[in-house]
Amino acid sequence: MYAGGAPGLAHSELVGVPEAETDAEGRFALESLAGLPVEERITVYKSGYVAWSNLFSFPPLRRREKTAAPAQIRLEPFPPGESHWEHMLFIDLARSSGLYGNESNPKLQTAIDRERRMR
């Protein structure tokens, strides 16, 4: 989650990285940082599937017009012949790991390590 500045003085600052794992039925809940003006960046990942981001779609990589997370997020199987390297770039972009490093979400990092080695 990213907090911005006052109007005209915009900036981004990492204010929290809540992580969640699904239960047996695939349900999860994320804690909210109530009271802060935040841009939520939600990334959902499961090995063998295309990751989902509320900000970007893949493939092809493009910015979403609507960024609110739906009540249900359905992951699609990873397409044969699709590039794991490009998929990892997408995941890194979706969670801004270039700015804050992979250590900010250890559960997700552990989950994607196998695919990262497939690059």
Image (spheres, helix red, strand yellow):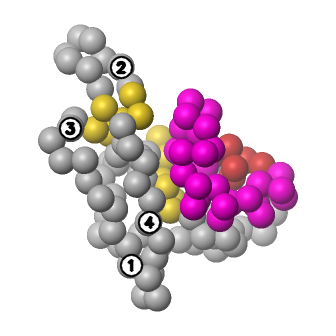
For marks 3 and 2, give the one nearer the viewer. 3
Spatial separation of the CA atoms under disc 3 and disc 4: 20 Å
Counting labels gives: 4
Contact? badges 3 and 4 (CB < 8 Å): no
The CA distance from mark 1 to mark 3 is 25 Å
Q: Quadrant of the N terminus?
A: top left
Residue 66 screen position, x and y as percent? 33, 48
Instruction: Find disc 2 in the rendering and name its residue.
Output: 11
Crowdedness near tag 1: few (<14), some (14–19) or many (≥20) residues, C-alpha within 10 Å: few
SS assignment for the magenta stretch, majority: helix
Q: What residue type is labelled 3?
A: Leu
Give the amino acid at mark 1: Arg
Image location of residue 49, percent across then percent down: 63, 70
Residue designated by label 1: 27
Q: Which residue lies furthest to the left in this view?
A: 35
Q: How far apart are marks 1 and 2 (CA)?
A: 33 Å
Q: Which residue is drawn at 65% across and 64% down?
A: 111
- Taking the magenta stretch, the answer to whether it contains residue 77 is no
Q: Give the range drawn in magenta.
A: 91-119
Between residues 57 and 28, which one lies in front from this camera angle? Answer: 28
Q: What element carries label 4?
A: loop
Look at mark 4 in the image and give the residue it sits on. Answer: 20
Mark 3 or mark 1, which is nearer the start of the sequence?
Answer: 1
Reading the image, the residue beneath label 3 is: 36
Mark with earlier residue (4, 2): 2
Question: In the image, what residue occupies the spot 59% across and 55% down?
Answer: 106
Of residues 70 and 31, the one drawn nearer to the viewer in this rendering: 31
Asked if 30 appears above or below 67 in the picture, the reply is below
* Of the image marks 4 and 1, the number of the one nearer the N terminus: 4
Report helix, strand or loop for mark 3.
loop
